[in-house]
Image: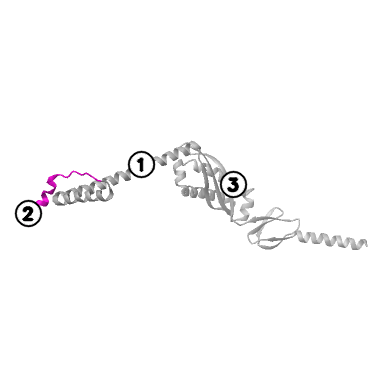
């Protein structure tokens, strides 16, 4: 009886060791294998066999990671204090470097993203920060990618999510935008007046060459006034306005 129990115990120990030596890695995972403290290989995906006690495996995901950069206090080049947050997209390209070259590549990338965000935005004026966000995103991405390359990490994209302006600065920007719209309206109105005056000058030249045309235009204006207004309109008409018509009739006779 005691011998059978011992056999069962040995079988249980053997199965436990066997299961501890088997690992299954998903398609997007790789396993960095350490044997007695030294890297021997990167394995996966699929079924992986380890030597119990001697081998140790660290899982590394190769999927793109979306990291939210917390709001950072930034003082712009023109001395405006703003809060800026962003999002960083990156993935591990070399599992060996990601495990060996840096203690925690997730934490290291996060800290580097925060310091880089403050550093680059501190070199920009507020107007450039608001108007040229795409260019700033590319600059941050290039700096991050260059500095994370020794860790086997590829930063593919950086996007500034939100720029939080102080209340007084928001009011100043609103006044600036209103003044700009007013300026544009005045320019458009002045341009319209200039074009209208130019056309009126050309019309005056044409009417001056033929006096009868001016009289006809005068009578047309009277007809328009009579049509638009039902009340009686008293409009003084100089007698000499009919002189061109008298000459015209005399010539026909």
Estimate the spatial distance between the alpha carbons at disc 2 and disc 3, rounded to whole Å: 99 Å
Q: Give the label, 1 or 3, closer to the camera.
A: 1
For the image shown, how many numbered marks are present on the structure? 3
Q: Which mark is residue 250?
A: 2
Taking the image as shown, residue 193 lies to the left or right of residue 12, namely left
Location of residue 154 in the rendering, given as x and y in whole percent from the top left corner: 56, 53
Location of residue 83 in the rendering, given as x and y in whole percent from the top left corner: 53, 41
Q: Is residue 125 magenta?
A: no
Residue closer to the observer: 153 or 80: 80
Between discs 1 and 2, the one toward the N terminus = 1
Label 2 crowding class (10 Å Cα cut-off): few <14, some 14-19, many 20+?
few
- What secondary structure is found at the residue carrying circle 2? helix
Label 1 crowding class (10 Å Cα cut-off): few <14, some 14-19, many 20+?
few
Residue picked out by circle 1: 183
Between discs 1 and 3, the one toward the N terminus = 3
Residue 178 location, quadrant: top left
Query: At 25% from the left edge and 49% from the top edge, which residue is drawn?
Result: 226
Vertical side of 80 occupied by 202: above or below: below
Q: Give the label, 2 or 3, closer to the camera.
A: 2
Q: Which residues are the magenta region?
A: 232-253
Estimate the spatial distance between the alpha carbons at disc 1 and disc 2, rounded to whole Å: 57 Å
Residue projecting furthest to the right: 1
Taking the image as shown, residue 191 lies to the left or right of residue 11, namely left
Query: At 46% from the left edge and 41% from the top edge, which residue is drawn?
Result: 126
Residue closer to the observer: 27 or 133: 133
- What secondary structure is found at the residue carrying circle 3? helix
Residue picked out by circle 3: 110
Taking the image as shown, residue 57 lies to the left or right of residue 236, namely right
């Amino acid at each position: 009886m005691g011998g059978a129990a011992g056999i069962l115990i040995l079988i249980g120990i053997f199965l436990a060791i066997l299961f501890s030596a088997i690992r299954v890695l998903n398609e997007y995972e790789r396993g960095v294998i350490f044997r007695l403290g030294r890297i021997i290989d990167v394995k996966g995906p699929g079924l992986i066999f380890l030597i119990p006690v001697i081998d140790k495996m660290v899982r590394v995901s190769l999927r793109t990671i979306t990291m939210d950069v917390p709001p950072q206090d930034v003082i712009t080049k023109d001395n405006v204090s703003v809060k800026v947050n962003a999002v960083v997209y990156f993935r591990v390209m070399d599992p060996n470097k990601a495990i060996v070259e840096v203690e925690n590549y997730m934490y290291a990338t996060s800290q580097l993203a925060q310091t880089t965000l403050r550093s680059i935005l501190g070199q920009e004026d507020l107007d450039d920060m608001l108007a040229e966000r795409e260019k700033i995103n590319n600059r941050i991405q290039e700096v991050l990618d260059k500095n994370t390359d020794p860790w086997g990490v590829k930063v593919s994209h950086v996007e500034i999510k939100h720029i939080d302006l102080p209340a007084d600065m928001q009011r100043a920007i609103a006044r600036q935008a209103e003044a700009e719209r007013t300026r544009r309206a005045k320019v458009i109105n002045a341009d319209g007046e200039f074009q209208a005056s130019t056309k009126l000058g050309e019309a005056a030249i044409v009417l001056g060459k033929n006096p009868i045309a001016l009289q006809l235009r005068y009578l047309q204006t009277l007809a328009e006034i009579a049509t638009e207004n039902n009340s009686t309109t008293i409009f003084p008409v100089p007698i000499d306005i009919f002189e061109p018509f008298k000459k015209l009739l005399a010539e026909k006779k």
